[in-house]
Amino acid sequence: MAELSSILKQATGVIAARGEGVHLYDEDGRRYLDFTAGIGVTSTGHCHPRVVEAAQRQVATLIHAQYTTVMHRPLLDLVDRLSEVLPAGLDRMFFANSGSEGVEAALRLARQSTARPNVVVFHGGFHGRTVAAASMTTSGTKFRAGFSPIMGGVVIAPFPNPTHYGWSEEEATDFALRELDYLLQTVTTPAETAAFFVEPVLGEGGYVPANTRFLAGLRERADRHGILLVLDEVQTGWGRTGKFWGGDHFDARADILITAKGLASGFPLSAIAARADLMEKAWPGSQGGTYGANAVACAAAIATLDVILSEGLVQNSADRGAELRAALREVASQHKNITDVRGLGLMLGNEFRDANGDPDGATAAAAQQEAAKRGLLLLTCGAWGEVVRFIPALVVDSEQVKEAGAIWAEAV
Ligand code: PLP
C-alpha cells in the first residue's frame, strides 16, 4: 500500500478539510484558530471571497500559458499593480513558483550581473530547500545535512542576534559588521563577492529582527564595493510585519528583492524585483520554468493586493500585532522558560530556554502540541525549534487575538 513518506514530518496531526478566514476545520468539523496561515502564506485569510472569485474566474478563462512562449493578461496586469507597492528603483520583475526558486533566481541574477562568484549570507538565515537555497541556509542542520557537496561560494557572516549572543543590539551589530569586514578580507574579497543575502527579520531562524544600523552597514559596504544587497522578503513581505515590506522598518534599500508567500494568498507564486540595469545583464532563457507566473496565481495575486490595500491589512497587522505582542508578553511574564517575545507586526515568536539558559525545543514543541489540542494551531522555528511563532492571517481581529492569547496561556 502506498503511504506518505516520513520525510513529511507533520507538526499538528490535523487533517484540514476547509478554511475560512483565520479558521481551519478538520474532517470532523472541529474548528481551529489557524495562527500558522500555511507558514505565513494565506495573509488574506483562508479562501477570501475576492481571491476565490478572481481565481475561479481565471480558471474558467485561461489556466496556463507558458510565459516564454506567450504572455497572458494576469501577468501583465500584476506587473503594473506591483509597481504600486515595490520600493522605488526595483522596476524589473521576474516570476517563479516558490520562495526557493525566487532565491535561486536572485542568486543567478546577482552572479550574472556582477560576474562575481561568491555570496554572503547571515547566521540563522533561511532561504529555502533547493540545493542552492539550502546551501545559503544556516537556520538548522536538517536543511543541509546529508546532501553534500553543497553549492560553493557561500560565505556565512554573523547576524546581529542580541539574544543569541547575550549582548545588546548595539554590541551584536558592532560584532556582525566587524566580522563581515574581516570575512570580506579573508574568506572572500569584495571583488569576488556578488551579493549579501539577508532577511529583514530572520524567519525560520527564530523571528529575530535585523536593525537599521546593520542594514545601513550592509548598504554602505555594498555601495563601496559594488556588491548587491538582496533582501529576502519571502516571509516578511506583504504586510506581515506591520509595514508592506519588512525592510521598510529599517529604511533598507535593496538592489534585488525576493517575495513569495503572502503574494498570492496560497497560490504558488514568487517574484523577484530588481534594478533595471541588473536585469538587463541577465540573458533571456537563463531563468524561468514551465509553471512560472501561472495565470490563476497571478489573478489571485492581483486580488490579494486589492484586499490588502482596500481592507487596510498592513495597518491591521501593526495594530493586532501590538495587541498580540502584549498578550504574549503577559503570558511570558508568568513563565520563566519563555525568555523572549519578539518580532514585528503579526510575525511574533516566543523563545523557550531551560533552567541552564539553553534553547529548549522540547518545551516549545510541547507547548505547541498543547495549544493544538485546545484549538490553536502554531508552528515552531529556530535552530533548536525553541521558538513558538504566531503568524495569523492579516485579517485577524482583536477578539481572535484575545482568544489565541487565552489558549496560549493555558497551553504553556
Ligand atoms: N526565504 C525565506 C525567508 C523563507 O522564509 C522561505 C520559506 O519559508 C523561503 C525563502 C523558501 O520558500 P519556499 O518554501 O516557498 O521555497
Image (tube, rainbow, N blue to C red):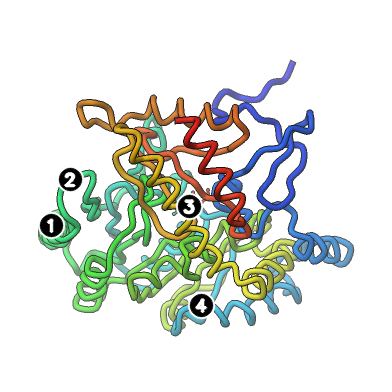
Residue 176 spot, x, y in % from top left: 17, 57
Reading the chain from its start, which is encountered first: label 2 or label 1? 2
The residue that disc 1 covers is: 171
The quarter of the rendered structure image containing the N terminus is top right
Q: Is residue 148 visible?
A: no
Q: Mark 2 packing: few (<14 Cα in 10 Å), some, or many (20+)?
A: few
Name the foreground residue: 73 vs 71: 73
Task: Look at the numbered discs 2 and 1 and tell me whether their residues touch, using CB distance below 8 Å.
Answer: yes
The residue that disc 2 covers is: 165
The residue that disc 3 covers is: 324
Within 8 Å of ligand 1, the CB of disc 4? Answer: no
For marks 3 and 2, give the one nearer the viewer.
3
Above or below, 101 against 90 in this view is above
Reading the chain from its start, which is encountered first: label 4 or label 2? 4
Name the foreground residue: 162 vs 103: 162
Q: CA distance from mark 4 to mark 2?
A: 34 Å
Residue 147 spot, x, y in % from top left: 40, 33
Total of numbered circles in the picture?
Answer: 4
